[in-house]
Amino acid sequence: MSPVHSLREELRTKAGSPAGYEVHTGIAVNATTGIPFGILGQLVWNRKAKKADRLFKVESEKWKCLDEQVSQRQIDQSRLIRVADRESDIFDYIDFLDQSKHRFVLRAAQNRRIKDQGLHDHLWEAVLGAPVVGTRSITIEQRGGQKKGLEQSARSARSRSAVTTKIRAITVELKEPRGNRTLSVNAVHVSSDDGDLEWLLLTREPIHTRHHVDRIVAHYEARWLIERFHKAWKTGCKIEERRMGTLDNFLRIMAITAPIAMRLLKIQVTANAPDDTTSATAILSQPELEVLWQKVERTPLPKTMPSCRWAYQAIAKIAGWQNSKGTGRVGLDTLWRGFEKLAALSEGWQMATMTKNAAKR
């Protein structure tokens, strides 16, 4: 391998590699519409870094570290609800959120001991013994297959589908794994009859009514957006294929492309929302919209603005998308290539306009 490509060996960017860089991202999502606002915070670290250079002593502290970063934002913290997957099921982290009065919905991974509650002294058994409070239809997002890797297990591909789930809710007191402290939380169990979906959610949000419980489940449903963000970032940027030469360049390209990936995710989510009346101006600037319309429709931009879905598919069309599967859905790789072309066309159009206006003076 030539010296110019030595960075690839240094970074070892394969998923799960202990020598590679890890990224932990927090994004803001509108709880009502499910549309992302942007990136709230982000941690980047190298597992092989010297102890003095590490962000935290143990990797599980990334949750608290990111939370502290988000807490420094000049926003109303009482309106934020921290939503996290099973990795976040750490007693000290849950206790930290509770002590900080931060709202949260975390997915449980451990069958923790609880303060005696009837016949049950473990979390999972107690929740399964609670009565069903209702049912809910949940959409399971599509995912590609995955080969067995260094620290990842093989998994089969999955198509997008809707499943009907049963919901249970109960209040329990978690016991500290090695100590005498207890922590009161509400637990919401969501499961489908076929076993394709099962969540056990821990929260301090109220569970007094069916509406409260539905809101908790809806908050966790939005967690899939973080997976889609990282897919947009990795798929579109193709960060593993870039020849960046130095570690500093690697970090710079990450900083440049992360906001682009977030914008593409926002375009995709907004365009596929049930309400297709949102104007394309919500996701594109006026120059971008004018150039895109001219490129695809070959006519002047109408007074009535096209919808977000039109813009989403038009961006894909300039990348060669033809809706061959008939779903109307655009892959992130195609969307990235189309947006890259749109950015170049928009920049050229604006430069030509500036040159024309300067010549008139």
Image: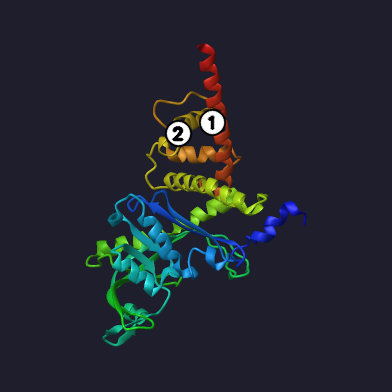
Q: Residue at x 65, y 62 (%)?
A: 12
Q: Which mark is residue 346?
A: 1
Considering only vertical position in the picture, is 36 above or below 202? Answer: above
Residue 40 seen? yes
Crowd class of label 1 (few under 14; some 14 to 19; many from 20; radius 10 Å): many
Q: Which color scheme is applied?
A: rainbow
Judging depth in this view, the residue of 334 and 158 nearest the camera is 334
Which residue sits furthest top? 361
Q: Mark 2 falls on what kind of element?
A: loop
The quarter in which the N terminus is drawn is bottom right
Identified by mark 1, the residue type is Ser
| Residue plotted at (26% across, 86% down) | 118
Say whether residue 200 is visible: no
Q: Residue 96, how many percent across, how many down?
A: 34, 68
Q: Residue furthest left?
A: 208
Q: Position of residue 105 (x, y in %)?
A: 35, 65
Which numbered tag is attached to residue 285?
2
Vertical comparison of 149 with 71: above or below: below
The local secondary structure at tag 1 comes to helix
Q: Amino acid at mark 2?
A: Ser
Describe residue 3's horizontal placement relative to residue 228 as left or right. Answer: right
Extreme residue in the right direction:
2
